[in-house]
Image: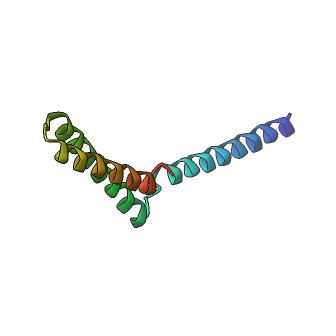
Amino acid sequence: MGDSGEGLVDAEARFQEKQAEREQERARRESKVPSPGDADRDRAFRSLTLAKVELERQAESTQHPVRLQQIREALKEIERRMAESDPGK
């Protein structure tokens, strides 16, 4: 009967070790700090998104055809830059 008790203790110890390893791996994944390059790319993408929203707002309210063309060209450029700096890539 003593042997079966030792087996349970060993199994419990292995279980505890695996549990600790999983917990460490989860903590490592959650605490992953983005590199400075990632942070810069995210910031640039957010800035482009805000600029796009502002230009779309201006396009809705402008009446002058030349200004509307300028806004459309600027929007194309912003969309091109957003495609290049998309943080989801």
Q: Nearer the viewer, residue 15 or 39?
A: 39
Q: Position of residue 6 (x, y in %)?
A: 80, 42
Q: Quadrant of the N terminus?
A: top right
Q: Residue at x 24, y 46 (%)?
A: 69
Residue 56 lies in quadrant: top left
Q: Is residue 18 left or right of residue 88?
A: right
Q: Nearer the viewer, residue 46 or 36?
A: 46
Q: Is residue 14 left or right of residue 81?
A: right
Q: Position of residue 77 (x, y in %)?
A: 34, 54
Q: Which residue, as the protein is rendered here, is positioned at the far bottom?
A: 36
Q: Position of residue 9 (x, y in %)?
A: 74, 41
Q: How has the structure been colored for display?
A: rainbow
Q: Is residue 16 left or right of residue 37?
A: right
Position of 80 relative to 6 (above/below): below
Q: Residue at x 21, y 43 (%)?
A: 68
Q: Which residue, as the protein is rendered here, is positioned at the far front?
A: 65
Number of numbered discs on residues: 0
Q: Nearer the viewer, residue 54 or 65?
A: 65
Q: Position of residue 3 (x, y in %)?
A: 86, 39
Position of 28 relative to 62 (above/below): below
Q: Residue at x 20, y 39 (%)?
A: 59
Q: Is residue 71 left or right of residue 87?
A: left
